[in-house]
Image (spheres, grey):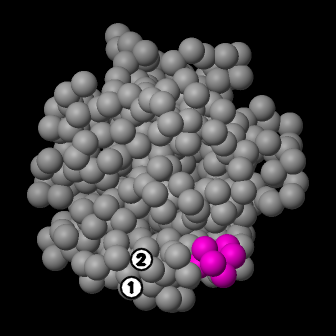
Amino acid sequence: MSLASGHEAHDLEGDEFERLTRNFPPYRTGLVRLSPGGWVFPKQYRKYADHLYNFEVRPTDVFLVTYPKVGTTWTQEILWTMIFNPDLDNPKQEVSLEKRSPFLDVDMLFPAETTPETEEFMKPALEEFKKLCPGKDPKDGMYWQIGAACRDRPRILKSHLPLSLLPPSLVDVAKVVYVIRNPADVITSYCHHCSLFTEMKFTGTVEEFAELFLNDDVVYSPYWLHVKEAWEKRSHPNMHILRFEDMKSDVTKELRKLNDFLGTKLNEKQLENVKKHTTFDAMKNRTTIFDFDITEKSPFVDPEVLKKDGGFFRQGTTGDGKKKLSPEMLKRLKEWCGKRFDFGLTFD
């Protein structure tokens, strides 16, 4: 299947399909790989690919573009708070983050055939869709249409897609914030995420997940190419690249840089408000981040994983990969990084 981006989407079959789906039961319904690039997505991506590529970008937009589990939700809340809530008095902060800052490509992560559980999960989004998109068909994808209809100025929009699959005018027209994280920590965080949520239901070990990651066989991979596409635009005045490790080391310094990039003109008191409002503990304890429940009673999470390893907000730290991955895997990962990130990036 040819896409508007110029990519071809091929159904995964045979040994390749078996390798990628062995520990991902929900993905047995189908995966596609794109060429060029080798991007891996659920088969539902084909339905939304052209809508996302042709998404109308506004000069006032702020796009948060990241690979999964690099500190996206944290950065998402930082951006919204800086722009709309620096005095911590905006009543809309009580609305879920996904409504305040739509995740454009999330539609593809849901199966084509809904269940009572998925219908319950999507009920808040459907209500928002009906309000913002009268006359539109939710089967065409609710979340990207909610993003398109968002009346906020600026719109803060999130995507895990690489730049090559997003609107080609994106960086020239809108502001883009991109987050990079050490691959070792991406592996352990993404593995936990995929194990926790039943829409992916990863059943393997962290070492098996790392093997898939290194072979560019995880959904949204290749990570290195995802980063490279953004890194090559690092000098563009509309591109701002953050490193998760720098944010953890000195978030005030990074907030000041964001303040300059966004043109929000926040004073030091307001920056301190943003810092306190978006700490790991503050976000973990808020009930307004998501529209759905992430507890042991939720049908969307594995209660055993939740009990053993934690929930969506698990640690929010650096260095977990060095603790969880074997010395042999860490050695392979170091060699992999040396080859894949040969465009000017290094990781400790």
**Which residue is label 1 attached to?**
346
Residue at screen point 57% across, 15% down:
113
Residue 321 pos. (x, y %): 63, 75
* Image marks 2 and 1: residues in contact by CB distance under 8 Å: yes
Residue 326 forms part of the magenta stretch: yes
When the figure is inspected, residue 221 is found, relative to residue 55, above or below; the finding is below
Residue at screen point 23% across, 34% down:
8
Residue 237 pos. (x, y %): 15, 72
**Residue 320 visible in this rendered orientation of the protein:** no
Horizontal side of residue 55 vs 292, given as left or right = left
* Image quadrant occupied by the N terminus: top left
Alpha carbons under labels 2 and 1: distance apart: 8 Å
Q: Residues within 10 Å of mark 1 (few under 14, many from 20)?
A: few
Q: Look at label 2 and name its amino acid.
A: Cys
For this orientation, the residue located farthest to the front is 15
Residue at screen point 58% across, 28% down:
28
Choose the circle earlier in sequence order: 2 or 1.
2
Q: Nearer the viewer, mark 2 or mark 1?
A: 2
When the figure is inspected, residue 102 is found, relative to residue 244, above or below; the finding is above
Residue 331 pos. (x, y %): 56, 81
**Which residue is label 2 attached to?**
337
Q: Residues within 10 Å of mark 2 (few under 14, many from 20)?
A: some
Give the dominant element type of the magenta stretch: helix, strand or loop. Answer: helix
Res 7 quadrant in image: top left
Q: Look at label 1 and name its amino acid.
A: Thr
- The magenta segment is 325-330
Residue at screen point 50% across, 88% down:
348
Q: Secondary structure at mark 1?
A: loop
Q: Secondary structure at mark 2?
A: helix
Horizontal side of residue 298 vs 188, given as left or right = right
